[in-house]
Amino acid sequence: MRRSATVGRAGTSPVRAYAPIVVTGALVALLPLRYGDSRAMMGVVIGGVLFAAYAVGFNVIFGSTGQLFLCTGALAGLGGYASAILSDRHGIPMVLSMVLAALVAAIAGGLLSWIAVSRSLGVIFTGIVTLAFSLSFQNLLLGQRDLTGGETGLVVDAGSDTFLGEQVAPFYVFVGLVMAYLALYRALQRSHVGWAFRALRDDEIAAELAGVDVKRYRVFAGTLGSGMIGLAGALYAHSERFISPSTFSFGEVDVLVIVMLAFGGIGSLLGPVVGAAAFTVLEEWMVSFNEYRLIVYGAVILALFLFFPRGVVPSVQSLAQRLRRRLGRPASPTAAAGERRADAPGPAASPVGPDVVGSEEVRAGGATPPE
Amino acid sequence: MRAVVFDGVVLGLQFGLLGVGLTLVYGLGGVLNLAHGQLAVLGAIVAALRIDAGASTIAAVLTGLAVAGFVGLALDLTLMRPVYRRVGEDRVLLGLLLMLGVAFIIDGVLEWRYPIEALSLRIGGDPVDILGVRMRTGSLLASAIAVGVGVVLVVFLRYATVGKAVRSVIQDEEGAQLCGVSPATVRAFVFALSGVLAALVAVTRSMTSPVNVNAGIDFTILALIVAVVGGLGSVSGAFLAGVLLGIVNTVSAHYIGTYITTIVLLAAAAVTIVARPSGLLGAGRE
């Protein structure tokens, strides 16, 4: 039990490190047993898994390197529209067009990241620049009718004759995608890249002084995460067979992705999945409230963030540690830190004792440099 | 051309007024008020309801401003308490998420109870010639209010004791506290003020075009962009950014037209931020 806490780091056994991903994937894969008969419910479930994929991509960018990208929807849309247009209009095979679409999104995200990094934009400023990109993209989709179908949207033909056109099969493709993303996230955490991410997230200047090329790692995270988001968007375009500007709008995607990740736990492995699951269930439940749906939704968001300001996954982990300590197992600082520690604080925070680890002091202690 | 620029200034002053409330709250407490636009709409709808009920326009508008200010104050005193106990990035993130929840609630209540309500103030009077450009009285009054509020705010922050207290907290919360300024009181005051300012924008906006129930999100996004381009925490920066973006908006709408205008506006905002990473008149802190 104690060793499992350090699971995110290099040096622990790969089995322990990747087990949570397999278990989560297996649990999620059981869902069609319950909902496989209903086309509508499968749509909801696939939507949830899609958002988990977005949230993991966003976690790579925001959770790992603190770049607030308010353009998840736009990047996914870039992927979705690029893949649809490439395959339907230009006859490029679907798989290849999806790869190209992911590349387009990766390049776009990488560029945004490069701009933000080379001008040392702060969190909020990066947010606004990417938000401007998001809204511009939305307007382009609406304006370029010939290419995108404008407001009415675009019917996507490529893929409908494959298993992606079936009712349950696309679900497993999405689950596979999310598991691959999680494995990638874990692999990053365990590599030298993970160390660099933790160092720069904790104290940018100290990381720079220690020889971490902060800019390069930020741009890398921006590119990789954007590519992941773009690929998920492209896959969704082919499995849903219809896309429109609202499929990828700021209000429909970004707000939800941020809320999901913040609720699940920023910078934690399973946070995006927990958040996506929670909010998919919530949204489904909310449908029955009809006209005062928004009110209930807002109230639930308030309640969730008042009770879990750090996110569910980190909260549960620190609770588990506290319980373990109370049961008389003296936890060493390393063990007590849990995943939170493996993700957020770098060397600077190492002497923290079990009492403060996992609580907000850790994040607060890892002072973010003034922007 | 001159007429187009004038229109841009009129629009820009509204943008500026919109950004001011947001910028003050963020500069002071690190809370990015994502419900700013919703507070504005709330004030406008309250005013519209009062007018429907037969109140005079002035009284109705004052009630709207008061309600928005009161809601701002109430939010600061209740929901924002746990936010202020945090520091740095944690505070920004939690504040933003909680205000997002508030935005949903306000939107939800308004759309549920008053789905078709809208505020539209008709300002009578003939168009006035200014430097050879005929301007509508409504636009002029709206601009006059924006300029007036801007000047009062700048003077107030510079010379009034409470204004100095506000600035001291913006500069250094701990230092201000050591000098006997209570950051909590100042924050509550500014949050209420920001609510009033938000509602005021909705009111002046309604002098040229109706403000309906679901305008909140657009107001919020615009306020965010203006406040950030101007430099978070800077009142004159917000007005400067507002006027600049307003002119860009009307000029491109006039000469290029269509949906490209929005993109030009957003690009202008992005370019300004990239060129001046702390905003036009930002103090260099986030």
Image: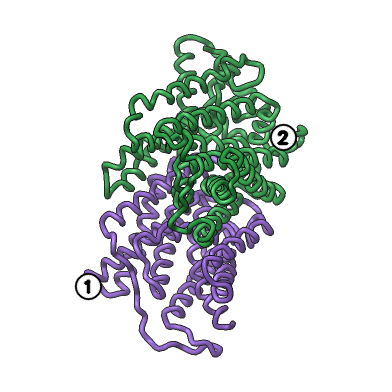
Chain colours: A green, B purple
Is A141 in front, or is B51?
Answer: A141
> Is residue B240 something that shows in the picture?
yes
Residue A128 lies, in percent from the top left, at 57, 53
Residue depicted at 55% across the width and 21% down the height = A338
Which picture quadrant has residue B243? Answer: bottom right
Find out whether the residues at labels 1 and 2 contact each other: C-beta distance under 8 Å: no
Q: Is residue B66 above or below residue A332?
A: below
Q: Residues within 10 Å of mark 2 (few under 14, many from 20)?
A: many
Q: Say which residue label 1 marks.
A: B54
Q: Which mark is residue B210?
A: none
Task: Report helix, strand or loop for mark 1.
Answer: loop
Q: Amino acid at mark 1?
A: Gly
Residue A293 lies, in percent from the top left, at 30, 46
Task: Report helix, strand or loop for mark 2.
Answer: helix
Q: Is residue A189 above or below residue A95?
A: above
Which picture quadrant has residue B27? Answer: bottom right
Residue B55 lies, in percent from the top left, at 25, 72
Q: Say which residue label 2 marks.
A: A207
Residue depicted at 59% across the width and 60% down the height = B229
Q: Residues within 10 Å of mark 1 (few under 14, many from 20)?
A: few
Q: Is residue B279 above or below residue A291?
A: below
User: What's the chain of the residue with tag 2?
Assistant: A
User: What's the chain of the residue with tag 1?
Assistant: B
Residue depicted at 52% across the width and 31% down the height = A178
Is B94 in front, or is B234?
Answer: B94
Q: Amino acid at mark 2?
A: Ala
Q: Residue furthest left?
A: B53
Q: How many marks?
A: 2
Is A132 in front, or is A233?
Answer: A233
> Is residue B173 something that shows in the picture?
no
Is B174 in front, or is A261?
Answer: A261
